[in-house]
Amino acid sequence: MILEDKLSIDYDLGSSLITVQKLIPIKNVGIEDLIIERGNTSGMWDNTLEYNYAAKCWILGVESFLTYKHHVNIHNMILPLKSRH
C-alpha cells in the first residue's frame, strides 16, 4: 500500500472545534435466532439492525425481510465482531 499523505494529523489544540469525550460502548451483546419483517413504510432510510459504539458483539441466525436501507449497519465498532463459527 502506498499513501500519498501521512496518516497522522496535527490539530490546533486552541481550536474550539475539537471536543474529547469518553465513550462507554455496549459489550458482549448478541442478537440471535430472530426473524424480522419490516411492515411499516415510515422512516424509509432506517436500518433493520444497528450496532453503534459496540464491542465484542454478534448477530447469529437472524433473517431479515423487506429492509429499507441496510439489513445490518455497524457504526463506530470498538473491536472486531466476535466470530461464532
Image (tube, rainbow, N blue to C red):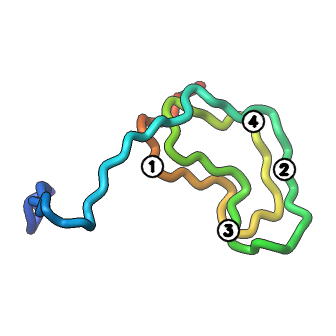
| Residue denoted by label 2 | 36
* Residue 52 position in % (x across, y down): 54, 48
Q: Amino acid at mark 2?
A: Ile
Q: Amino acid at mark 3?
A: Lys
Earlier in the chain: of badge 4 and badge 1, it is 4
Label 3 packing within 10 angstroms: few (<14), some (14-19), many (20+): few
What label sits on residue 69 in the rendered view?
3
Q: Is residue 43 above or below residue 64?
A: below
Residue depicted at x 69% and y 72%: 45
Rounded to the nearest whole Å, what is the CA distance between mark 3 and mark 1?
18 Å
Q: Is residue 17 above or below residue 49?
A: below
What label sits on residue 61 in the rendered view?
4
Earlier in the chain: of badge 1 and badge 2, it is 2
Residue depicted at x 31% and y 49%: 20
Rounded to the nearest whole Å, what is the CA distance between mark 1 and mark 2?
24 Å
| 6 and 54: which is toward the camera | 54
Q: Is residue 54 above or below residue 10?
A: above
Residue depicted at x 14% and y 56%: 7
Label 4 packing within 10 angstroms: few (<14), some (14-19), many (20+): few
| Tag in front: 2 or 4 | 2
| 22 and 57: which is toward the camera | 22
Q: In which quadrant will I find the C terminus? A: top right
* Residue 64 position in % (x across, y down): 79, 52
Q: Amino acid at mark 4?
A: Gly
| Tag in front: 4 or 1 | 1
| Residue denoted by label 1 | 76
Earlier in the chain: of badge 3 and badge 1, it is 3
